[in-house]
Amino acid sequence: MFISEGVMETETTPNIPTESHGMNGTDKGRAAIKTQFLTTKEKFHELLDSGGKGPNDDKASDDAAPKETAEDSLEEPQEKKFKVDPDEQERTEKRNSKRMRGQNKSRPHMKPTSYDNRRLCPSIIQERETKCVYGDKCKFIHDVAEYMALKPADVGEHCYLYDTFGKCHYGLSCRFARAHISADLKNLANEERVKAMEGRTPVRNSLDKDLQWRLRKKVVPFTASDAYMKTVFKGGHKAGEGWKKAVTAENVDNCCSAVVISQCSEGEKLQTDNQGTEVSQENLALVKTIGPLTDADVIKLRQCEKKQVDFKDKLYLAPLTTCGNLPFRRICKRFGADITCGEMAMCTNLLQGQSSEWALLKRHESEDLFGVQVEGCFPDTMTRCAELLNNKIDVDFVDINSGCPIDLVYKKGGGCGLMTRTNKFEQIIRGMNSVLDVPLTVKIRTGVQEKANIAHKLIPEMKKWGVSMITLHGRSREQRYTKSADWDYINTCSQLASPIPLFGNGDILSYYDAMKARETEVSGVMLARGALIKPWVFTEIKERRDWDISSSERLDVLRDFTHYGLEHWGSDTQGLEKTRNFLLEWLSFMCRYIPVGLLEQVPQRINERPPYYMGRDYLESLMASQHVGDWIKISEMLLGPVPKNFNFLPKHKANAYK
């Protein structure tokens, strides 16, 4: 835990925000900050540009004012401004205002490899005894002296990988190489530390090269999935109805008997009459087995034999695209998150063996209750993906994303689109359930349209389909984040879901918000944006207090993230810049945090924008900046100066303005 002696606590009862809760209690939508800390946009950026010396140098700046005026008089005059048609100006302003909303879809994307064009050959880095197999055709540098002349300067004196594992596998290419490179340019190792780490696997669920090859060649068998799909499509519509009846019969007494259903194995098939249209109810009856185990007993696990997970009363870190990476999840685990889940992975990309998609499934050893989230819109691909994950990776549950609002997913019928395609949704859930040995969970929204909630209609059906847990985000797809989450509706749905656990999600930023959420009948709460803005919210909820965390402690949290990032993505230039990129994405959310000691009313509300304010020290002010350039300054404190061709824009346009 990151708690230190310098932590200040607020023991008073939180002020319940009113409708006009905002700056000085009058400006709705803006946080209420103590008057002595408020400032203007110009003074705020003047302080940051001066490096924190502004307040102490007021007199000096006043004395220098006439001199600056004299210098300014020698500058070129401004260009003449042309008269602009008012109507045209209004149209231009409207276009510009529209551009500042939503995502930066056409933002410049710099690949980490572009910062390190001239790389050292892996055969040299790993100090292999054999020469490079590509010989003269190799595109990497083989001359160590040439590489060292081109390599950027080292960032620091200590290498986190060397200190942790006893050896840095990035050798000469490491940006902290001076910590473990000898005078004759050999990579050193701490044998004692290496021996202590022997046999330990900090990260699991990596993609095996052989499996990747077989996925690309489409030679991986999906026996259980294919058998299930035959039960869905064989004999047309009526056969599908018979399959539903069979599954309903299975749910009646699945803990006391083995069920002979067609999806149990490829050899078992649905029995139909001579016309192939009606399913024989006699063949779908429950068959009780006595004596030795039969194939029907061992091929398919019954519901009560599957791995059981106790979700109740736990804090769930939501699967967050881009920011919910493994290093960030490690930070949240240290602060007290109980359940973690990987970023949303596309099932088709997983079935194709894409390395970037499989990287989203990786699990750190500290994640004791971990699941993966998959997205898809067809029963065959989703069932095959579930079977693949069940056989190849180590997870505690698998989650279906049926709440993603983005157009790319929704227009294909995935994400929120599944909520309106109930037949496909049912086939996906039942199919995945039939091939998984772990619980299957679902994440949904209130609905698609803003004033047409449909979650309450789906939840009773999902109980029949075999879902183990449901997470409900209290907003519709159209609503996005424009209004507060509807916790009254979440409470209604949690009553419908009982006895299946239902987690509520939306607007949790403090222990006060979590307490209000637990007054409903939800089994637990999921945190998304709240964890990005302040990951120590898990500690606040568990200890029931407000934590006035200092700027230096927050910087230590960011430093830990960079250490975990270098461990996960690498300590060479490519890995370092990838770590920086994800750090900047996180800072685009973290800058919204307002220290507790500055608030006029506690707690801070998640949908309130902070006004311009001066922090209690320069670093606190810098962390409050909404400008990309200031986030880069913070990254340079931890990861050294950015490359000359460095370029970054945050994912959401509204996150950066000056």
Image (cartoon, helix red, strand yellow):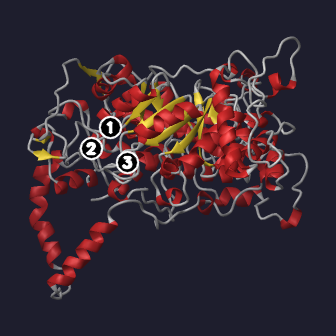
Q: CA distance from mark 2 to mark 3?
A: 16 Å
Mark 2 vs mark 1, CA separation in Å: 8 Å
- Front: mark 1 or 3: 3
- In the displayed structure, would residue 276 be above or below residue 161? below
Mark 1 sits on what residue?
507
Q: x, y (%) of residue 540? A: 35, 23
Q: Secondary structure at mark 2?
A: loop
Look at the numbered discs 1 and 3 and tell me whether their residues touch, using CB distance below 8 Å: no
Amino acid on which the number 3 mark rests in the picture: Ser
Amino acid on which disc 1 is placed: Asp
SS class, disc 1: loop
Q: Is residue 322 left or right of residue 480?
A: right
Q: Nearer the viewer, residue 548 or 205?
A: 205
- Residue placed most toward the observer, 472 or 228: 228
Q: Is residue 422 left or right of residue 246?
A: left
Q: Residue at x 81, y 28 (%)?
A: 299
Q: Is residue 179 visible?
A: no
Q: Earlier in the sequence, mark 2 or mark 1?
A: 1
SS for callout 3: loop
Image quarter (top left, top right, bottom left or bottom right) of the C terminus: bottom left
Q: Is residue 535 left or right of residue 279?
A: left
The residue under label 3 is 476
> In the rendered view, would you say 519 is above or below 170?
above
Please rate how many residues cluster around mark 2, counting C-alpha atoms within 10 Å: few if below 14, some from 14 to 19, many from 20.
Answer: some
- Lower sequence index among marks 2 and 3: 3
The residue lying toward the viewer, choosing from 406 and 255, is 255
Q: Do the CB atoms of the residues marked 2 and 1 lie less than 8 Å apart?
A: yes
Disc nearer the start of the sequence (1/3): 3
> Which residue is denoted by mark 2 in the rendering?
607
Residue at the image position 34 percent from the left and 23 percent from the top: 518
Which residue is at 37% across, 56% downward?
628
